[in-house]
Image: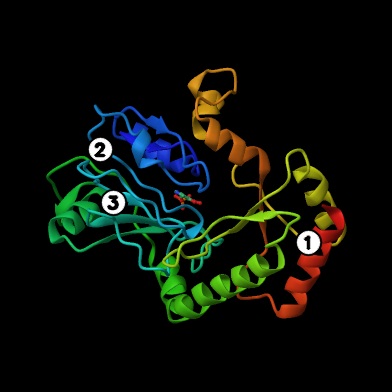
Amino acid sequence: MALPALSFFATAESVQMIGAVPVFVDVLPDRPLLDPAQVPEDVEIVVPVHLFGMRAEAPPGRRIVVTDAAQCLGWGHGAPGGVTSALSLYPTKTIGVAGDGGAVLTDDPEVAALARAIGSHGMSAPYVHARWGRNSRLDAVQAAVVLGHLPELARRAAARKAAAAVYDAAFQDGPVAPLPRHADDGVHQYVVLCPPGRREVIQAGLHRAGIDTAVYYPAPMDAQPVFGGDGRSACPNAAAFCARALALPAHEGLNHEDMARVITAVMESA
Ligand SMILES: Cc1ncc(COP(=O)(O)O)c(C=O)c1O
């Protein structure tokens, strides 16, 4: 199964959990998304990941069983060419639960029944176990939390996009480089590329100004110790991205003054 080298590790884990072999594909040179042209010919299934809310393209003619849509809730990116998306409802997401949770979106009733059965010990009817499953139910308290947030989804998604537009305008001439976004991209994380070798300095400057930042992700997935390598990635675009990426605060809780403070801190520390 082909997947982008750049994602949260859970994407690779889900491939491994079904006994398939993850085939890591490099990302595009200018966008942190799977490069469809680099998917090997002999790989039948592709797992697209809409990273940071940006819409990933899949190579034509390949099968997509599930799209990793953990970071695109709120922008309507269904699975390109498929019918099923996996969501995370972890609290950092645009809407989330009060702990851990997730969901599957599908318009296929058979997939919905299968997902319900797998998540509830393989039960197709009360105490009828037609297949193996697990305990992966969203408990009622967490479901109530996310349903409470649901009416906020569109407003929060729009606020993230509006924050990104403010930062894009501020940084269009540097010192950091916004990611090129397409009209139908959403914004889950607002990530910029720092000049080579400057990320830690910029991050420290923002930290001194009381501004939290994050690195998504420090390394491509194929460089993780679990693969037993020497920590180097075979995906140069993903590795170059990981060396320079920095996520700035961009969410509905920020006002224009907050964003101006972030921009000033970036300008002063870069
Ligand atoms: C792209 C991506 N895929 C998968 C996941 C896994 O989500 P969870 O930890 O809720 O299972 C995340 C979570 O952050 C994610 O960002």
Badge 2, how many Cα within 10 Å: few under 14, some, many 20+? some
The residue lying at 22 percent from left, 34 percent from top is 44
Between 225 and 42, the residue placed more toward the observer is 42
3D distance between C-alphas at marks 1 and 2: 41 Å
3D distance between C-alphas at marks 3 and 1: 39 Å
* Residue 119: numbered disc: 3
Amino acid type of the residue tagged 2 in the rendering = Ile
Between 179 and 108, the residue placed more toward the observer is 179
The residue lying at 28 percent from left, 55 percent from top is 80
Amino acid type of the residue tagged 1 in the rendering = Ile
Residue 207: percent from the left, percent from the top? 82, 55
Residue 195: percent from the left, percent from the top? 73, 45
Mark 2 or 3: in front is 2
Horizontal side of 117 relative to 57 (left or right) equals left
* Residue 211: numbered disc: 1
3D distance between C-alphas at marks 2 and 3: 23 Å
Between 203 and 150, the residue placed more toward the observer is 203
Mark 2 or mark 3: name the one nearer the start of the chain: 2
Residue 55: percent from the left, percent from the top? 41, 57
In which quadrant of the rendered view does residue 184 lie?
Answer: bottom left
The residue lying at 22 percent from left, 53 percent from top is 82
Question: Which residue position holds label 2?
Answer: 45
Amino acid type of the residue tagged 3 in the rendering = Gly
Disc 3 is placed on an element classified as: helix
On the rendered image, what quadrant is the N terminus found in?
top left
Residue 96: percent from the left, percent from the top? 49, 66
Disc 1 is placed on an element classified as: loop
